[in-house]
Image (cartoon, grey):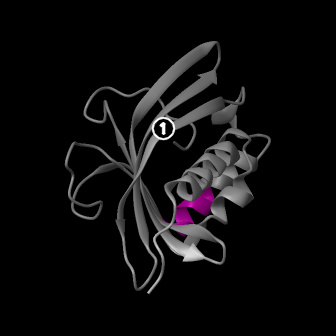
Amino acid sequence: MMEQPDVRILERFLFHEARLLDEKRWDEWEALFVEDGEYWVPASRNQPDPHTHVSIMYEKSLLRAVRLKRYRHPNAMSLQPEPHSVHCISNVMLDSFDDDSGVCITNARFVMLEYRRNNTNIHGGAVTHTLEPHGESYLIRRKKIELVNCDGELDNIQLYF
């Protein structure tokens, strides 16, 4: 049996992930995922899964690799001028912990400011991470972002939440 982690350890992991996104450290961010890890942004409230419903985003490693390749390319016209972001993570809670596997499910709130072409977009909502233990830290099995306005009109989203 594994010992339940202190929430502060989980907070540090989530804060580190947010920093990697803001600093566009794409390789390091991608390395936080297990091989078949999921990144999911549902298109409606209480959406049960990404497989039988339309999502704003649903990516596993292959689609993330394609998007990250575009992010790195200096001539990606959709990213000119380059967007910038600031992620704020708060209210981190440990929702569940499996004693045998050490898998944690966290829930937090987030606000992300995205700036591009003299426009600032504000995105916010809840983020749920399913984390698997990996050495002294964790890897992301699933990251689910529930936007507060998921069922409303959304601007063109350029960066990861």
Query: Is residue 61 highlighted in magenta?
Result: yes
Magenta region's main secondary structure? Answer: helix
Q: Which residue is mark 1?
A: 90
Amino acid carrying mark 1 in the image: Ser
Residue at 51%, 66% in the rendered image? 5
Give the quadrant of residue 34: bottom right
Percent of width and height locating residue 136: 66, 73
Whether 26 is drawn above or below 103: the answer is: above
Q: Nearer the viewer, residue 10 or 147?
A: 10
- Residue nearest the observer in this picture, 105 or 69: 105
Give the residue drawn at x 71%, y 29%. 80
Q: Which residues are magenta?
A: 60-66
Whether residue 120 sits left or right of residue 72 in the image: it is left
In front of the other: 152 or 10: 10
**Does 72 sit left or right of 43 as displayed?**
right
Indicate left or right for 32 with 60 as reference: right
Q: Position of residue 14 (x, y in %)?
A: 57, 51
**Residue shown at 48% from the left, 23% from the top:** 122
Quarter of image, res 158: top right
